Image: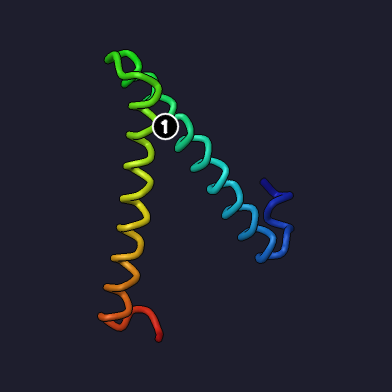
């Protein structure tokens, strides 16, 4: 641990952010794989599972756009 404490604060912050991003990427991928396997086990076809993920992604985009619009209206985001 002493090696990490000797690093400059900016480098330590970079390592923390990068490590957390990698951890999130791995867990998100694992959860998506579990969803695929679950729906496959329920008897859904590959096309139905693909459409399920398409539906999920489209509504993620809509949610982000709505959140950005709300942020602009409420003043959280500068114009």
Q: Which residue is mark 1?
A: 32
Question: What's the image's color scheme?
Answer: rainbow
* Residue lying furthest front: 47
From the top left corner, tell me how far across and down residue 12 is, in percent: 65, 58
Residue at point 67%, 66% (across, down): 10
Q: Is residue 69 left or right of residue 16?
A: left
From the top left corner, tell me how far across and down residue 3 is, in percent: 73, 49
Residue at point 38%, 79% (across, down): 77
Task: Using the rendered view, name the quadrant where residue 53 is placed.
Answer: top left
Q: Secondary structure at mark 1?
A: helix
From the top left corner, tell me how far across and down residue 71 is, in percent: 31, 75
Residue at point 69%, 60% (across, down): 11
Q: Taking 39 as reference, is 78 above or below it?
A: below
Q: Residues within 10 Å of mark 1 (few under 14, many from 20)?
A: few
Q: Taking 39 as reference, is 20 above or below it?
A: below
Between 49 and 11, which is closer to the camera in this rendering? 49
Label tally: 1
Q: Quadrant of the C terminus?
A: bottom left
Between 55 and 38, which is closer to the camera in this rendering? 55
Residue at point 26%, 80% (across, down): 74
Q: Is residue 52 left or right of residue 29?
A: left
Between 61 and 35, which is closer to the camera in this rendering? 61
Q: Is residue 53 left or right of residue 2?
A: left
């Amino acid at each position: 641990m002493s090696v990490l404490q000797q690093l400059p604060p900016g480098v330590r912050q970079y390592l923390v952010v990068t490590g957390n991003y990698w951890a999130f990427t791995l867990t998100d991928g694992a959860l998506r794989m579990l969803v695929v396997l679950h729906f496959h086990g329920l008897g859904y076809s590959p096309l139905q599972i693909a459409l399920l993920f398409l539906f999920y992604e489209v509504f993620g985009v809509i949610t982000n756009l709505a959140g950005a619009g709300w942020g602009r209206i409420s003043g959280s985001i500068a114009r």
